[in-house]
Image: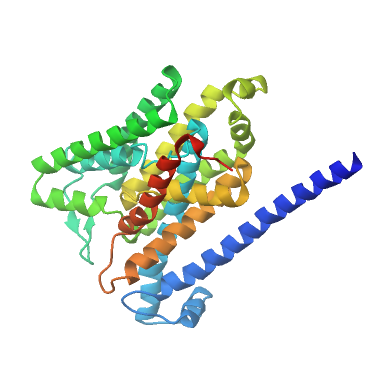
């Protein structure tokens, strides 16, 4: 008996040590990527000079302007957007018990994209002007955010209704997400058809998915939404663990499953909608990152949620850096790179079907 107890304790310590190593390694990788992402671009800046500027060295001239006004906002945008999309996908997968769940595959991102297009053309936010660097800037991005969330909520409520009243299987939810994505994509196309040239340009530019367009004020709003959502999700990690064993078992242990599911879907949809409204549609980050972490550290949501946020930041920052350097001086939209990464994984998961294991 004592031998079994020692073995269990040793396995537990080994598992915790593995999570600790994963966390430390992820932070080191993220720090390394931050330096590289700031260094590369149309103007290459030596990493030593980047570190000097970040540490407060008195540096004047164009290098300091490039770092603080262009590179750092883009890097922070990639970090917070990647974390938010990844957390949103993790929660959707856990709540719906569906390994294919994410804002993109369930049609939430496309619905948010339709909402943004709706605000640009129908609500008048489409009276845009060109920024100093040639980018198209919306007059009121907050109306765009509200509209994006409203339509993302429509998609979310449809998914919740299927789970609640029809007991829909994982395959049904994914097919519904594909249908919703197609529906809202068609709606966006219809809006573009009736829009003028400037409005069409703003919609197309917006839907590309680009973290480089985010301003400091945009980042402040995204972070203000991300942090409370992340704190709530982490605080409910044990409840999500219990819920994964079945609704009846969770309710027997005092977990309000229905309330937990609705709040989780609403917050994850809101988080995805806010990110989409500022950086455009970036697909598959919410699908890829949680699976990477789940395979490495297991399914314990108390650790899976924060570590997925970290992995999502790494994934999107690496993708954005690749998008800026692969065909330099041409800069690809980061959504193109993430789609190339995520589409094969999505096909793989579909092929695995019911044989897919969460651990």
Q: Which quadrant is home to the C terminus?
A: top right
Which residue is painted at 33% across and 29% down in the image?
A: 154
Q: How is the image coloured?
A: rainbow
Q: Residue at the far right: name it.
A: 2
Residue 272 screen position, x and y as percent: 40, 43
Q: Quadrant for residue 135, please give it.
A: bottom left
Q: Nearer the viewer, residue 188 or 235?
A: 188
Figure disc tally:
0
Q: Is residue 134 left or right of residue 291?
A: left
Residue 291 screen position, x and y as percent: 50, 47
Which residue is painted at 20% across and 49% down in the image?
A: 203
Q: Is residue 254 left or right of residue 328?
A: right
Q: Is residue 174 above or below residue 53?
A: above
Q: Is residue 163 left or right of residue 113?
A: right
For the question of whether residue 85 can be seen, the reply is no
Which residue is painted at 50% across and 73% down in the image?
A: 54
Residue 123 screen position, x and y as percent: 19, 38
Q: Residue at the far top: name it.
A: 165
Q: Which quadrant is home to the N terminus?
A: top right
Q: Is residue 100 above or below residue 337?
A: above
Q: Nearer the viewer, residue 213 or 333?
A: 333
For the question of whether residue 192 can be seen, the reply is yes
Which residue is painted at 31% across and 44% down in the image?
A: 142
Q: Quadrant for residue 352, please give it.
A: top left
Q: Is residue 84 left or right of residue 112?
A: right
Residue 200 screen position, x and y as percent: 14, 49
């Amino acid at each position: 008996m004592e031998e079994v107890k020692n073995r269990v304790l040793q396995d537990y310590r080994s598992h915790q040590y593995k999570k600790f190593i994963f966390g430390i390694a992820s932070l080191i990788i993220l720090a390394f990527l931050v330096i590289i992402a700031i260094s590369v671009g149309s103007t290459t800046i030596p990493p030593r000079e980047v570190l000097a500027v970040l540490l407060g060295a008195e540096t004047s001239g164009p290098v300091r302007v490039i770092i603080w006004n262009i590179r750092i906002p883009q890097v922070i945008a990639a970090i917070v957007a990647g974390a938010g999309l990844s957390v949103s996908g993790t929660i959707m997968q856990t709540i719906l018990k569906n390994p294919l769940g994410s804002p993109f595959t369930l049609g939430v991102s496309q619905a948010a994209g339709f909402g943004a297009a709706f605000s640009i053309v129908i609500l008048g936010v489409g009276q845009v002007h060109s920024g100093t660097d040639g980018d198209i800037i919306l007059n009121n991005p907050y109306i765009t955010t509200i509209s994006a969330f409203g339509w993302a909520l429509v998609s979310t409520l449809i998914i919740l209704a299927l789970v609640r009243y029809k007991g829909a299987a994982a395959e049904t939810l994914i097919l519904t997400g594909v249908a919703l994505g197609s529906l809202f994509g068609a709606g966006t196309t219809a809006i573009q058809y009736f829009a003028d040239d400037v409005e069409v340009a703003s919609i197309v530019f917006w839907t590309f998915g680009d973290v480089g367009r985010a301003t400091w004020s945009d980042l402040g709003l995204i972070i203000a939404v991300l942090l409370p959502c992340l704190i709530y999700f982490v605080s409910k990690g044990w409840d999500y663990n219990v819920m994964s064993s079945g609704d009846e078992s969770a309710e027997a242990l005092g977990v309000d499953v229905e309330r937990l599911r609705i709040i989780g879907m609403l917050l994850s949809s809101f988080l995805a909608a806010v990110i989409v409204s500022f950086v455009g549609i970036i697909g598959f980050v919410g699908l890829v990152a949680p699976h990477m972490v789940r395979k490495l550290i297991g399914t314990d949501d108390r650790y899976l949620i924060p570590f997925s946020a970290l992995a999502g930041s790494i994934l999107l920052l690496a993708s954005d850096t690749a998008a800026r350097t692969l065909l330099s001086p041409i800069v690809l939209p980061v959504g193109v790179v993430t789609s190339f990464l995520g589409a094969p994984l999505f096909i793989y998961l579909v092929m695995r079907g019911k044989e897919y294991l969460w651990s």
